[in-house]
Image: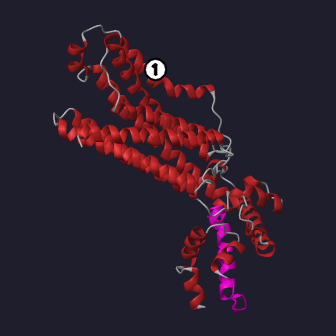
Amino acid sequence: MDKLDLLQGIARISVFVSLLLAFFLLTVKTENKLANRLFAWFFIFSAIDLSGFFIDTSTRIELNLEIFRATACLFGMPLFYLFVLAVCYSDFRLKWKHLVHAIPFVVVNLSFLPRIYLNDTDLETFLPSLNQMAEIYFIQILIEFQYAFYIVSVFLILKKYREIYMENYANASTSTYKWLFQITCVFLAAHFIVALKNIIRYSGFREVFLWANVLVGSIALFITCWFIMKALKHPELFRGVNSKLKLTKDILPKKNENTIEVKEHQDEVVDAQISTLKQYMAEKEPFLDPSLTIQELANQIDIPVRDLSVLINHKMDQHFFDFVNEYRIQKAMNILKDESKSQLTVLEILYEVGFNSKSSFNTSFKKYTNLTPTAYRNAS
């Protein structure tokens, strides 16, 4: 099979699969419809981008449409960035200000007007010089800067999301963060290959460039199929946090020159609060609720959530996530050592102590004991 035929075949399959996934995301029932729609449009624009591998440009109008189509790739990373925001923050909504993300697309197409879209030079004369025009170099450089900006922004969003989640939620499942982090890393690796392909374009090695295009098309198909498998296997991956939640470091009062007496009084208050909190955790066992949040715990012990967040995340130097899991693991250890409960399976125990995932339970248990639950039971 000719390399061009192979490339076009892979591209057609990739476009079909991308549009199929977009259709699935637009029609599937979910609480986070906005995230699904943004991701669907991301795949629609990916399909538009990939369609360039098999579009013919035999007339001037077709060439202009093809160039306009090629600029649509500038919507890819903004849509992915907005998608990540929609997944991470349950209260995220699109606003008019988000139209700012379309500026690169508008600027590029305006810059193409004089010498590309409105150029009436003969097609055979125009085509050989097209790739050497300053406008083409401009869009390629702009794409690289845009990609770097959005990929860094996404990693920063994920970092903050994970910190907020750890400080305010006790659900041991961090699958959303892991999935988004994996996607971002895959996109980063894929874009690196695309960037190398674009460099090869100007090297004069046409054969190598064609094979590089085949590789890019194959990677796009693989990534899309991977997304489909993830979406079907883990439909629960959309679990956002409230964007109004603040990190403890952002709500701590500024240091001041308090007297020794004031500091001692503050320490006494903190010690009393910690004692009350630990006693409540031991006696009432609120950690048995898999979906326990710091807000719910604050309501139960009648402490303002802001003060409780500072108490646990700053004064006790623990994330709320780790603080709660310590009690869960301790209770699991007691059950595993209890011979009268030897008939309980590890799966039954993890659900009993407040976990909702076997992998999360095993990871947390090993973190605190350096042993797997089964090994701990056998050693007891």
Note whether 376 is above or below 80 in the view shown: below
Horizontal and vertical percent for residue 203?
A: 17, 35
Note whether 19 is above or below 125 in the view shown: below
Residue identifier under label 1? 106
Viewer can see residue 247: yes
Q: Is residue 214 left or right of residue 74?
A: left
Residue sitting nearer the eye, 360 or 17: 17
Residue drawn where x is 24% and y is 36% of the image: 199
Q: Identity of the amino acid at label 1?
A: Val
Query: Which image quarter: residue 120?
Result: top left
Q: Give the quarter of the figure containing the C terminus.
A: bottom right
Horizontal and vertical percent for residue 369?
A: 56, 79
Horizontal and vertical percent for residue 365?
A: 58, 75
Magenta segment includes 330: yes
Q: Is residue 43 left or right of residue 311?
A: left
Horizontal and vertical percent for residue 307?
A: 74, 56
Q: Give the quarter of the figure containing the N terminus.
A: top left
Q: Residues within 10 Å of mark 1 (few under 14, many from 20)?
A: few
Query: Which image quarter: residue 336?
Result: bottom right
Note whether 271 is above or below 211 in the view shown: below
Which residue is most to the left? 204
Residue drawn where x is 39% and y is 19% of the image: 65
Which residue is most to the front? 1
Magenta segment includes 118: no
Note whether 205 is above or below 341 in the view shown: above
Bounds of the magenta segment: 315-344
Query: Which image quarter: residue 355?
Result: bottom right
